[in-house]
Every structure is written in structure tokens, then in C-alpha cells.
Amino acid sequence: MIYRDLVKEGTNILDKHSIYTGFARVLMLELLREQDIDMFAEFDNEADEAIATDYMKKIQELAQDIPLGYVLGYEWFYGYKIIVNEGVLIPRGETEELVGHVLSDIDDYFEDPVIADVACGSGAIGLALAKETGLPVFATDISEEALVVAKENAKINEVDMTFYQGDMLQPLIDRNIKLDVLVCNPPYIKNTEHVQTSVLNNEPHVALFGGEDGLFFYRSVLSNAHKVLNEKAMIAFEIGFDIGEAVVECAQSFFPTAHIELRQDMNQCDRMVFVYQGISPIKD
């Protein structure tokens, strides 16, 4: 069977199970890329038997509503290959936007800042910041399983990251580490919120839910941030689309003199809150 027909068969299987059919082509693209094969050059050629077998096996996993990142064992984030498994969340495109904003602010306001990725999960945020700035990054997570994955990602991508296990900021507080840039994508889904089945059944709940109002971990970080921030510093949060104003109000209560910005993602959904302490934001 040629590669094109395999993709067609995979598309039909996913369609029957009401799974996004575009995954059939993306899966083939990734499997061939792993073998340094250009899918578009080989699409009408006879498929390698081992690749065909692996492809159909993974199509069946996708048909069971297992996320593509877990089926492949990795996800691409900010151009970097990030290992993922069921112990960590699969990094999202919205989080890439957060990284882009943070990098822009680093260019505008800092020179060689001390950076931390709090609740790091797979380490994707800290890894991307380390790669793009060339600077070392601290990272914390309460999950030992997540830190195993994050450390592997740092090794594979050859970045200088120091990992500490513990609850949010506590490992940094214990070591008296002072930060210029604190980035945090905490669990923020409300306990009562409906969650996509593939996410709920496969991704770690400890990394998803943020209490009754989704603000539990934002309060934790904001109430302790003064213990780790330098006089001139920024906090960058990813947020749920429906808690933007609440996170801003929470930040204002702990940082009444700071400049605080609520930012939207490319879909115009509230997705980020930035807190600037001792910084006068540059006017557009």
C-alpha cells in the first residue's frame, strides 16, 4: 500500500470514531520525519512495512481519543521537540504565545534576567526561554513524575535548567532565590467546569484543576511572590479564558502599585496576565 492510501485509511477510521481527521496526515508526517523521509516526496510511493504497521497501530490509539502528543510521545513547542507522557500536560499553542510575550518583555526591560518557570510540567516554557535567551532558568514542580520528563527535555534540548521539586514558589523561597522574571502556567480549570473527554481521561488532573474558582494557584503565587521577586521584576501568567478579570483583581490586591495587563491570544480570548513591578511599560 502506498503512503497516500494509508493516510486515506487512517482518515476513514478517525472519521468513524468522530476524531479530528487531520490527525491522520499529521501522524504520517511525524512518523516519516522521524525516519528523515519527506512525506510529500514519498506520498505516492510504496510504504515501508514497519512504518505502515506503526502508523495503523497509532491510528487505533487516536481512535480511542488518546491525544496525538501522547500517541507520538512528543509535541513541538516553539520549534523545539518536547517529550510528553501521561504525567505531564501536552503544551498548547496558547502557551507559545505566552513565551513570545515574555521574550519581548525581556528584550524591552531586562539584561540577563534571572528567570523561573513555576509549575513547569514538561518544562516547555522554561526550555523555550532558555533556548531563546541563552540564559539559565530555574524550574519547579510538585510532581516528581513531571520533573523526570522536564529534566529529560532539558537534556535533549541542551539547555541550562535547574529543577526543584516542591509546591509552586516554595523551593525558590527555601533557597532564597531572587527573580527578575517569574513565569507560571498553573492549573486553572474550575473544579466544576466541563472538560474535553480526551483531556479529562488522559492528562494529569493535578496539572488541570485550580479549585472552585480556578484561582487557587494564582493566589498561592501572588501571595508569596514578594519573597522571590527583585525590586524590578515581572510575573507572567497563563490563565483560563474566563478568569482574566478575576486574576487581575487578585494581582491588584497583592501588588497595588504594579502595572497589570490582561492580554488576549490570537483568538481574542483572555489568556495572559502580566504584572510589572518597578517597571514603566513602553507605550506603543
Image: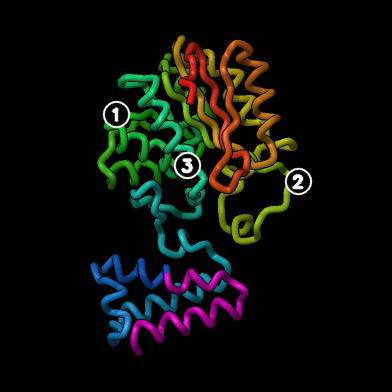
Magenta part, dominant SS = helix
Say which quarter of the image contains residue 102.
top left
Q: Residue at x 69, y 40 (%)?
A: 242
Which residue has dot 2 on it?
A: 192
Categorize mark 3 by other alpha carbons within 10 Å: few (<14), some (14-19), many (20+).
some
- Closest to the observer, 264 or 224: 264
Left/right placement of residue 53 relative to residue 231 reads left
Which residue has dot 1 on it?
A: 135
Q: Secondary structure at mark 2?
A: loop
Categorize mark 2 by other alpha carbons within 10 Å: few (<14), some (14-19), many (20+).
few
- Callout 1 touching callout 2 (CB < 8 Å): no
Task: Residue 258: give x, y in percent of width and height.
Answer: 57, 15
- In the orientation shown, which residue stands out farthest toward the bottom? 1
Which quarter of the image is occupied by the N terminus? Answer: bottom left
Mark closest to the chain's N terminus, 1 or 2: 1
- Real-space CA distance between mark 3 and mark 1, rounded to the nearest whole angstrom: 20 Å
Say which quarter of the image contains residue 65.
bottom right
* For discs 3 and 1, the disc positioned in front in the rendered view: 3
Task: Residue 41: give x, y in percent of width and height.
Answer: 26, 76
Which residue has dot 3 on it?
A: 97
* Residue 7 colored in magenta in the image: yes
* For discs 3 and 2, the disc positioned in front in the rendered view: 3
Q: Amino acid at mark 3?
A: Glu
- Real-space CA distance between mark 1 and mark 2, rounded to the nearest whole angstrom: 39 Å
